[in-house]
Amino acid sequence: MDSAHRTARLAGRRRGGLLRSVAFGFLVTALVEIGFLLLASFLLMQTDDPAKNASLFGFLGLSLATFIGGFAAGRRNKGQGALAGLTLGGVVLLLLFLLSLFLPNEGSTLLFALVTRATLVLFALFGGIWGGSTASRRRRR
């Protein structure tokens, strides 16, 4: 068997490419974020002033959701977990930018916005790295 045919056969066994794993990670991110928002809204409604900590709970939920989504994308795309996590972070960043065009400005400073957006990308990147490293350690049968 020549090497080109063997390479094509091995490539056909992969579970999808980078874009499929990023799409899967984005779906996981969206589902986890919905769950976190429901939990946060329930917890905040138990307090006297729910609006006081709403942005903190929203940011923490989105950070954890991007980490879990990056982990899922990295685990699905074994060899390139860091790239999958970084791409997922970029997709989430692009979505937040598009949403910010239509939502009213909440008055945060540019430095705060840059730090929070960079944190989201780093959480997705670290999730992808961790997911990719755990996927490569699985036993093959």
Image: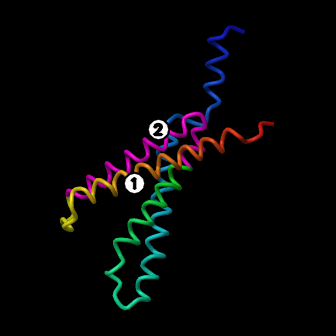
Residue kind at label 2, given as amino acid type: Leu
Q: How crowded is mark 2: few (under 14 residues within 10 Å), some or many (20 or more)?
A: some
The residue located at (41%, 86%) in the rendering is: 45
Number of the front mark, 1 or 2: 1
Task: Tell me how far mark 1 sits from mark 2, CA to CA.
Answer: 22 Å
Q: Position of residue 92 (x, y in %)?
A: 38, 51
The residue located at (48%, 59%) in the rendering is: 65
- The picture quadrant where one finds residue 48 is bottom left
User: Which residue was labeled with disc 1?
Assistant: 119
User: Which residue was labeled with disc 2?
Assistant: 19
The residue located at (56%, 49%) in the rendering is: 72
Mark count: 2
The reply to whether the magenta stretch includes residue 50 is: no
The dominant secondary structure in magenta is helix
Q: Position of residue 112 (x, y in %)?
A: 27, 60
Report the span colored magenta.
72-101
